[in-house]
Image: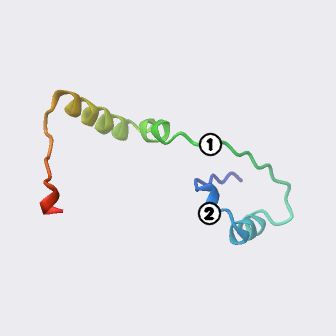
Amino acid sequence: MHISYRLNADELDNNFLESLKAAFHGKAIEIVVYESDETAFLLEHPTNRKRLLTAVENIKNRNNLVEVSWDSI
């Protein structure tokens, strides 16, 4: 079985450990920890990649921008 968790280090608590124990009861497990790169994660999916890169180009070219005044917030 393979399960991948994506969470903030501050979310690691006893409940998380207990859920791991329950999911893999009696089995040997391997825990690998690495810092995730949110940009790489968002760019992995082709739809997200296209949307984000289009947004970057829009900002560079000042196209399709929405201006919001502080008074309207």
Q: What x and y, as percent, mark residue 13?
A: 69, 67
Residue hosting label 1: 35
Q: Is residue 23 above or below residue 69?
A: below
Q: Return the x and y of residue 15 as percentages of the image width and height.
A: 69, 72
Q: Residues within 10 Å of mark 1 (few under 14, many from 20)?
A: few
Task: Name the one closer to the observer, 67 or 11.
Answer: 67
- Among the 4 quarters of the image, the one containing residue 32: top right
Q: Residue at x 70, y 46 (%)?
A: 33
Labels 1 & 2 near each other (Cβ < 8 A)? no
Drawn side of residue 54 relative to residue 72, left or right: right
In-front residue for pair 36/43: 36
Residue at (42%, 36%) from the top-left corner?
Answer: 43
Residue 59 vs 14, above or below: the answer is above
Q: How many marks?
A: 2
- Give the label on residue 11, or none: 2
CA neighbours of label 2 inside 10 A, class few (<14), some (14 to 19), many (20+): few
Image quadrant of residue 24? bottom right
As helix, strand or loop, the secondary structure at mark 1 comes to loop
Of the two numbered discs 1 and 2 on the same chain, state the one appearing first in sequence: 2
| Residue plotted at (85% across, 59% down) | 27
Q: Nearer the viewer, residue 46 or 41?
A: 41
Residue 48 x, y percent position in the rendering: 36, 41
Task: Say which amino acid is labelled 1.
Answer: Glu
Q: Residue at x 76, y 49 (%)?
A: 31
Mark carried by residue 14: none
Residue nearest the observer in this picture, 73 or 11: 73
Amino acid tagged 2: Glu
Q: Is residue 13 left or right of residue 64?
A: right
Residue 58: x and y in percent read 20, 33
Position of residue 20 in the picture relative to residue 69 (left or right): right
For the C terminus, the quadrant is bottom left
